[in-house]
């Protein structure tokens, strides 16, 4: 579905406000309740979570690419470093996603991400042994 750049920026801004508010208040379960104008841009909790998860996944994929390019060939370490870097930068968004990991809108994506990261962590543990 095509969405104009202006609409995307507004949606991004309201999500950033919601995430920042969640971080300030510690409200990760239903952060959209604290930013009522989020409903001017999203039609459901599912839509909010899908976009937040898509933003997270895009940031993680980009960071993985950067770490691999700058790394020394240790793919497992590069992926884990990338995850740690994005988690530091987007800690509050991650906490919202974790609080809703079982929501049908993002459950599949969260499960796949955990499986991927878990396999890299397991490989790193095997390599260290």
Image: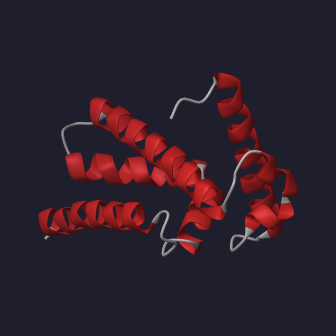
Given residues 105 and 66, the one toward you in this image is 105
Left or right side of 50 for 19: right
Left or right side of 23 for 126: left
Left or right side of 51 for 10: right
- Which of the image's four quarters has the C terminus? bottom left
Q: Residue at x 38, y 50 (%)?
A: 81
Q: Residue at x 63, y 55 (%)?
A: 48
Task: Note whether 2 is above or below 27 in the view shown.
Answer: above
Residue 91 location (% of width, % of height): 61, 58
Q: For residue 33, which quarter of the picture? A: bottom right
Most distant residue in the top direction: 5
Residue 22 location (% of width, % of height): 76, 62
Q: Which colour scheme is used?
A: secondary structure
Total labels: the figure holds 0
Task: Note whether 88 is above or below 12 in the view shown.
Answer: below
Q: For residue 4, which quarter of the picture? A: top right
Residue 92 location (% of width, % of height): 65, 59
Residue 73 location (% of width, % of height): 18, 39
């Amino acid at each position: 579905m095509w969405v104009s750049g202006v609409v995307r920026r507004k949606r991004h801004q309201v999500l950033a406000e919601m995430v920042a508010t969640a971080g300030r208040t510690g409200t990760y379960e239903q952060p959209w309740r604290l930013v009522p104008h989020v409903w001017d841009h999203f039609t459901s909790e599912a839509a909010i979570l899908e976009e937040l998860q898509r933003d997270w996944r895009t940031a993680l994929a980009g960071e993985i690419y950067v770490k691999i390019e700058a790394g020394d060939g240790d793919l497992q370490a590069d992926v884990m470093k990338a995850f740690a870097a994005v988690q530091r930068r987007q800690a509050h968004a991650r906490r919202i996603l974790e609080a809703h990991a079982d929501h049908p809108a993002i459950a599949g994506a969260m499960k796949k991400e955990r499986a991927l990261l878990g396999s890299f962590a397991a490989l790193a543990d095997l390599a260290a042994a």
